[in-house]
Amino acid sequence: MEKGFRLPNGTRIRLVEGDITRIPADAIANAANAALAGGAGVDGAIHRAGGPDILRELDEIRPRVGRLPAGQAVATGAGRLPARFVFHAVGPVYRDGRHGEAEALASCYRVCLEMAEERGCRSISFPAISTGVYGYPAEEAAPIATAEVRLFLESRAGSLREVIFVQFGEAAYRLYERLLGESGLQEAQD
Ligand code: APR
């Protein structure tokens, strides 16, 4: 399933249900961990599909950054993925919503969008960061993700033309579809 939404300035938000490693984009955001050591979930899928080059690059980056705090990200190449870059973002572990989780999650999206523009990317795809192992309730995370992306696209005239939200499973897809549909965005027919 997929659906497109157009912003007044012509930039687009696309919603896709499926595996993020199979969707071409200039940059792919990964839901990584502080150790930048790979893992399960989307992190595991990205390393499996992208191949060993990605972890080799992280091995070189790790000594320089140490443990990456939640809300930050580092960039590597994309190995065998249909992309130029992977941005390894560390999402917050959800505790109770009163320990800065929302700001850290918003920062993950903002930092990856900025890194995409710094590299002249025209498109970037995002999984639902922190909503798996890190326990962030999808209903609380989705409005943060969509608001951060809309704010960025509406306030910039940079290289980014399209942001793709890739949802794993129909429930997550329907949640984003409802949010984006209710936010007054025009559906893109093409
Ligand atoms: N494509 C798109 N989305 C995916 C994929 C995939 N191939 N695999 C999983 N997801 C979805 C999950 O369903 C969830 O909605 O990505 C979202 C994020 O879930 P996780 O991958 O568990 O990431 P997160 O909750 O941020 O936890 C990060 O998990 O894998 C470890 O190393 C990772 O320690 C880190 C932690």
Image (cartoon, grey):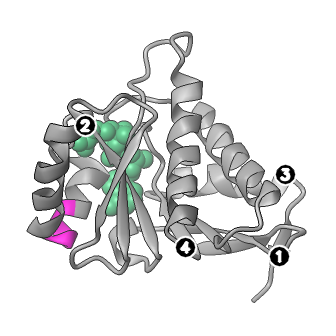
| Mark 2, residue position | 65
| Mark 3, residue position | 183
The numbered mark, 1 or 4, whose residue comes first in the sequence reads 1
Q: CA distance from mark 4 to mark 2?
A: 24 Å
Q: Nearer the viewer, mark 3 or mark 2?
A: 2
The numbered mark, 3 or 4, whose residue comes first in the sequence reads 4
| Mark 1, residue position | 10
Q: Are marks 4 and 2 in contact (CB under 8 Å)?
A: no
Which contiguous range is marked in magenta? 47-51
Q: Nearer the viewer, mark 2 or mark 1?
A: 2
Q: Secondary structure at mark 1?
A: loop
Image location (x, y in percent) of residue 154: 81, 58
The numbered mark, 3 or 2, whose residue comes first in the sequence reads 2
| Mark 4, residue position | 120
Q: Nearer the viewer, mark 1 or mark 4?
A: 4
Answer with the quarter of the image where residue 100 lies: top right
Q: What's under tag 2, amino acid-wise? A: Val
Nearest the eye: 2 or 64: 64
Image location (x, y in percent) of residue 14: 64, 70
Left or right? Give the position of 81 relative to 111.
left
Q: How many marks?
A: 4
Q: Secondary structure at mark 2?
A: helix
Q: Residue furthest front?
A: 64
Task: Name the residue at 14% across, 39% down.
Answer: 63
Q: What's under tag 3, amino acid-wise? A: Ser
